[in-house]
Each structure stands twice: as C-alpha cells, then as structure tokens.
Image (cartoon, rainbow, N blue to C red):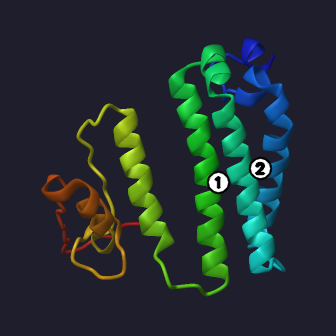
Amino acid sequence: QYNTYHPGKVIMYLDEVATDISSGYASLLAGLQTASQNQFSGFSDSTFNALLNQVDTLAASMKAAEEELIAASSLADFNLHLHLLELSKQAAMVIYAYTNGDNSQNYRDRFMAENTLWWQEQLGDAKAVVWGHNAHVAVSLNYGALGLHLRQRLGEEYVALGFSFSRGDFT
C-alpha cells in the first residue's frame, strides 16, 4: 500500500491495481535496467529481440486487463503506465543500436517524434512547443529527424524555427 503511506510520490501502479502483472513488470524493468547499464554487452540480436518481446507481452497483459486497471485507477494512469513500457523499449532500442553501430535508422529522433505526438494526444491535441537543436527540428534533412517525422504526421501544422547565436553556449 505504497500510495497510501506516500501520497504524491511515484505511484506503484501495478502493485496497487494488478498484482498478478506486477511481478513480471518489476522483473522485466530490473533486467532492462541492468542490461542497458552494461550497454547490452554480450547480447545477440536474438537475445535482445527476446527481451523486447517480453516488453510487448507485458503490454499485452496490461491491455487485456485494461478495464480492471482503469477501474482501479484512471484512464490517464493506464495510458501513462502503458507508455512507460514503450519508453523503456525505446530506450533499449536506442542504446542497443548505438552500441552495435547500427546507423540504419535514426531511432532517437523517431522516438522523440512519437513521444511528442503521444503527449500532445494526452493533452487533448493542444498546441505544443518542442525545443531542440536545429538538426533535430529540421524538416528537410534526409536522416529521419524529429522535425521530418512531425511534418509527415502533422503536415503544415508543424512549423520549425531555427535559431542562431553570436556567442554563448548551450547543452
């Protein structure tokens, strides 16, 4: 009953509303954390894909229990925790691709675009400002930049603004 004694803290969502799913969730996230900290050292493609399949299986379990989970919490909580699984999968894919020298796709920018669109949907299709390096927000670059993905999805509603500075720095 973590949430009862720690109001305002991170919700231990599955522990509270779906204990039958939570053990798989905790185990999977612990495995992902350890593997990513070691940059998936020693993972073959098949081992890595098996790990991603575990994430998909857990997401499918959550979707199968959607009514129960929403009834015990809220639609917003359900959507957030389902998306957190997707974020863990995305992070693993970026690290694995980078570690193995796979430059065939720009996973990072694709996922930034997907997550920007997800947040926009959660906010009721509100207008959003995404601040990023010009190379990320650009629409004309061929390497799959964030801006290109957003333009493909939003059309002319996506506007990229570039900035330059005469001095100073940024991180």
Q: Which residue position holds label 1?
A: 88
Check the picture and name the quadrant holding the C terminus. bottom left
Q: Is residue 12 at least partly visible in the picture?
A: no
Of 134 and 169, which appears nearest the observer? 134
Gap in Å between the C-alphas at discs 1 and 2? 8 Å
Q: Which residue position holds label 2?
A: 29
Q: Is residue 58 at least partly visible in the picture?
A: yes
Q: Residue at x 80, y 34 (%)?
A: 21
Determine whether label 1 and label 2 are within 8 Å by CB.
yes
Left or right? Give the position of 55 relative to 154. right
Left or right? Give the position of 107 relative to 158. right
The image shows a total of numbered marks equal to 2
Q: Position of residue 126 (x, y in %)?
A: 26, 36
- For residue 107, above or below residue 131: below
| Type of amino acid under label 1 | Ser
* Sooner in the amino-acid sequence: mark 1 or mark 2: 2
Q: Position of residue 3 (x, y in %)?
A: 72, 18
